[in-house]
Image (tube, rainbow, N blue to C red):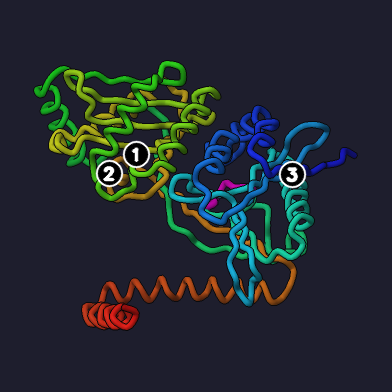
Amino acid sequence: MSQMEVHGAHKLEELDMHAEAWDRLSSVAPQRSPVLSHAWVRSYLEHLLKPGEKWFCLFAYEDQELVGVLPVIIRQKQSALYGGKRFHAPSDPDVWTGDMLVASGRELETLAALLDGFARREPAHAVLRLSKLPPESPSFRVMQDGFGGCRILKEPNGYGSFLKINGSHEAYVASLSSNFRSNLKKAGKRLNRLGRNDILFLSNEDITEEHIQQFFGLEASGWKGRAGSAILSSKRHTGFFTNLIRRLRARGMLECHFLKVDGKLLAGHLAVRTQSKLTLWKIAYDEEYARYAPGNMLLERLMHKVHEEGATDEIDLITNFPWHSNWGAQKRPYQDLIISAPRLVPYIGNLVSLKANASLRLLRERVKKSPKLSAVAYGVRDLVRRAGS
C-alpha cells in the first residue's frame, strides 16, 4: 500500500517548486475553481495578506504525485475561548472561496493526511475555517462531524450564480423573458447606430499589457472606482491582479472579452478558464453609455459564442445579483466549513460564535425592516460615538 507524505512550505519560492503539479491538479478538481491554483494562491500571499498575518502551505504526495494542497493563513487574535490564533484558507472578496485542493478518488485519505499535517504543525489549534465552499467541494462532501477526531460545523454563507450552457443558442434565447429579449434587441439597434461594433475574444498570449491596462481603466471609471473597490483603487490589489494575470496567462487560463464602438472600449470581462468552465471574475462597462446596455450586449455575444463552439458547459458569475436572473442564472449555495480541534472548550466557543453571528444577522434584518427599530439603533449608535469622542 502506498504511503502519503505531507510536506510544508512557508516561503514564497518554496511554493514554486510545486507550481506545475499544483496547477495541473487544480485544473481537474471538481470545483473547477481558479482560486485553488498556484497562480492564485501565490499572488494572494504576495499581495493580500493583512498586517500581522502569517502563512504556511501543506502538500500531500502519494508515490511522488501531488494529491492535495492546503494553504493556511494564521491570524493572531486573543480570545479566552480560542487561544491566540485563527486559521483559515485564503479567502476574501477577490479570492472568494477558501478550500483544500484534493485529487479525485483520493479525497478521504488526502483530506485526513492534510488535517493530520495541520494538527502536527499546530497541535494547540482550535479552529480552521474553509470559506464559501460550493456543493461540489470534496471538503464539504467528505468531512462529517467527527472526521479525524475533529468537530465539523457548517454555516450557510450566501449564494453565487451560474449559467448552464447546453442546447442551442436559439433555444436558450427563447427561454428568456419576452420583455428582456425585447430590451436586448432595442439596445443592440441603438448600439449599431452609435458606430461600428467590434467584439474581441482574446486568450492567453493574445492578451497584451495594453489590453489589461484598458480593462483596469474601464473598471476604475465606474462605480467600483468611486467605491474604492476597483483593481486600481489600491497598490495591493493592483499588484495582486498584475501578477495573477501574468501567471494565469502563462498557464493558458486567461481570457479577456471586449466590446468596442468605433475603437472606444465600452464593456469588458476579465475571465479565467478551468476545463469547460469559464469564470467571469471581473466585469466592467462605461457608465456614460449605460442606455446602450454595453454590458448586456457583450454578455449576449459571449453566450452566442459559447453555445456555438460547444467547449463550455458553465459560465460562473461568482456573485448573485438581481440582474443575473434576467439571463436565467441558477443559484449556487455556499457554506463555510469550520473544523474544530477535538477539545470541548474550543468546540463550545466556536458553536457559540456561530449562533451569535446567525442571531446578529437576523437582528440586523429585522432592524432594517422596522423604521422604529432603525431609529432606536441609530440613536444608540450616535450616543456611543459621542461617548467615545
Which residues, given as a range, are shown in magenta? 132-138
Q: In this view, does 50 lie above or below 283?
A: below
Q: Distance between the residues labelled 3 and 2?
A: 39 Å
Q: What residue type is labelled 1?
A: Leu
What's the residue at 61%, 37% (across, down)? 29
In the displayed structure, 12 sits above or below 200; it is: below
Mark closest to the chain's N terminus, 3 or 2:
3
- Name the outermost residue toward the right: 1
Q: Quadrant of residue 203?
A: top left
Mark 2 and 1 residues: CB-CB less than 8 Å, in contact?
yes
Amino acid marked by disc 3: Gly
Which residue, as the protein is rendered here, is positioned at the far front? 389
Q: Is residue 285 left or right of residue 248?
A: left
Residue 196: x and y in percent read 16, 17
Rendered residue at 63%/50% (across/down): 55
Tag 1–tag 3 contact (CB < 8 Å): no
**Mark 2 crowd level (few <14, some 14–19, many ≥20, 10 Å Cα):** some
Residue placed most toward the observer, 91 or 325: 91
* x then y, percent, for residue 209: 39, 22
Q: Name the residue under label 2.
A: 225
Q: Which residue matches tag 1?
A: 232
Q: Is mark 1 on a helix, strand or loop?
A: helix
Question: What x and y, as percent, mark residue 120?
Answer: 79, 56
Image side of residue 45 versus residue 379, left or right: right
Nearer the observer, 5 or 150: 5
Residue 32 against residue 138 in the figure, above or below: above
Q: Quadrant of residue 365?
A: bottom left
| Residue corresponding to mark 3 | 8
Of labels 1 and 3, earlier in sequence is 3
Res 146 quadrant in image: bottom right
Q: Is residue 308 visible?
A: no
